[in-house]
Amino acid sequence: MTDDRGKIAQRGTVLVVDDEEGVRASIRAILEDTCDVLEAEDGAAALEVLRAHEVDLVMLDQRMPGEAGIDVLPRIKAADPSTVVVIATAVRDLRTAVEALRRGAYDYLTKPFDVDDILLLAQRALEKRALEREVLGLRSALAGGAPGGAAAGSFEGMVGRHPEMARIYQLVTQIATTPATVLITGESGTGKELVARAIHRRSERSGQPFVAINVAAIPDTLVESELFGHEKGAFTGAHARKLGKFELAHGGTVFLDEIGCLRLDLQAKLLRALQEREIERVGGVRPVPVDVRILSATNVNLKAAVKSRAFREDLYYRLNVVPVHVPPLRERREDIPFLVEHFVGKIARECRREVRGVSAGALEVLARYDWPGNVRELENVIHRAVVLARGAVIQLQDVPLDVALPETGSRLAEDTGLPLREACEQFERQYILRVLEGVQWNVSRAARLLGVHRNTVLAKLSGWGIQRPAAGDGRSLSL
């Protein structure tokens, strides 16, 4: 956390929304010694301020030009549900108070204000906000809640509320403030770098550089120079001194991805950096002190590499002080809907596409696929689907065939082939789902197009464990 963010978290930021300048000035005078106070004269101006600043407490006047405060309230909560909102008015109206609380207001004040009441209310509201911030990540993981705009069950950029993900969130919170080295393991594409970045952001080094290095992506001849730097004239082409990643990350965190690919001779230099907190540039004659925290990641079994003498045992134990394992996506399938929702929203914004969601049929095949490329592969598939979608909802036909029919697609390329009955069943399943989506899940109409009785369609859906979309998802469910 940066110093500026720390200051805001300590003092709190209050937005006073009132069309009377005198009221705004009075509240500013009361709170400015303990809070950063922002002002807005109406609801529209308040929303502009909220888009530009992180606000903890909004004191919102009920009667203003334009929209009434109680109508602006839901838009404030939609932007960030954790923002504390207090409705203020000069007229005592019980019905308005009840409606404000129902819409998410924290409290209700009647003008003229008492100084002590405002101070006490601000203190209680900011304490509530600070407590929510402290536990929001873990609660999101366990209960599916999330800050405004974030996917359900999200924590520091990671999405999911599977018990294993909740364990990772808790572990990150525990170890982030310590200097311990961490070894993050997991298959390619599971999000190991996200874990490393979460540890860095929650550490005391968060205001310093986070330098990520993919060891496997650097040519062998350049790895040492990239990591530790070189002196002028150290080798052909070294026309000037170059600082390595360790020096560039001084005070911060170095993340070594694919650490298992590091050469044995460089493993010895890394071990020295860990033990002595100093490095030597290529061609250098004296050690250079560095202050970095080292996080590393691998998708290979380092214990097996140690046994085969491909990885130093002493370095392994230095790196593996705190192990964190990220599970593959196929082992936490219940997180797929949350990830899909997250990626659809994110990619639709980036690509400026009016895509809002995924159909039941498309989500069903996405959840059933094994995702050998894990979260990275899922994001790639959703990116393609969002770009190519022909409507506001991603349909089954927008999902790549190798995802929709993975067994068929993989086995058709094998000599053994797929049993005819199984291949027919898989084709039938996808074909019926596509027809249903094409007629907005009107079962009778789909049955006519398929040339079967509607009870046959219902029986097929029941046998596959597929339920028709619920009424409120924007599609007709007429039978």
Image (cartoon, helix red, strand yellow):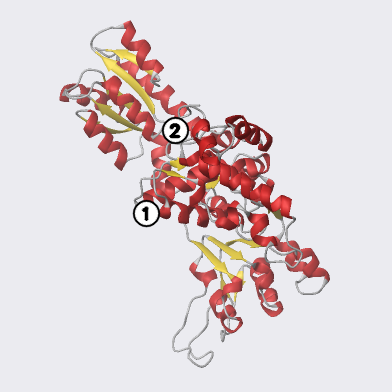
Q: Is residue 161 above or below residue 386?
A: above
Furthest residue toward front? 451
The quadrant where residue 467 appears: top right
Q: Which residue is mark 2?
A: 475
Image location (x, y in percent) of residue 151:
49, 40
Question: Judging from the image, what secondary structure is the residue with disc 1 in?
Answer: helix
Q: Callout 2, which amino acid?
A: Arg
Q: Callout 1, which amino acid?
A: Cys
Q: Is residue 411 above or below residue 471?
A: below
Q: Looking at the image, which residue is at 56% across and 56% down?
A: 401
Q: Residues within 10 Å of mark 1 (few under 14, many from 20)?
A: few
Q: Which residue is mark 1?
A: 351
Q: CA distance from mark 1 to mark 2?
A: 25 Å
Q: Give me the disc on residue 238.
A: none
Image location (x, y in percent) of residue 123:
41, 24
| Residue 183 showing in the rendered view | no
Q: Residues within 10 Å of mark 2 (few under 14, many from 20)?
A: some
Question: Judging from the image, what secondary structure is the residue with disc 2 in?
Answer: loop
356 vs 478, nearest the viewer = 478
Q: Looking at the image, which residue is at 77% across and 68% down?
A: 314
Mark nearer the N terminus (1 vs 2): 1
Q: Is residue 431 above or below residue 261?
A: above
Image location (x, y in percent) of residue 447:
54, 35
Tell whether 90 sits left or right of 267.
Answer: left
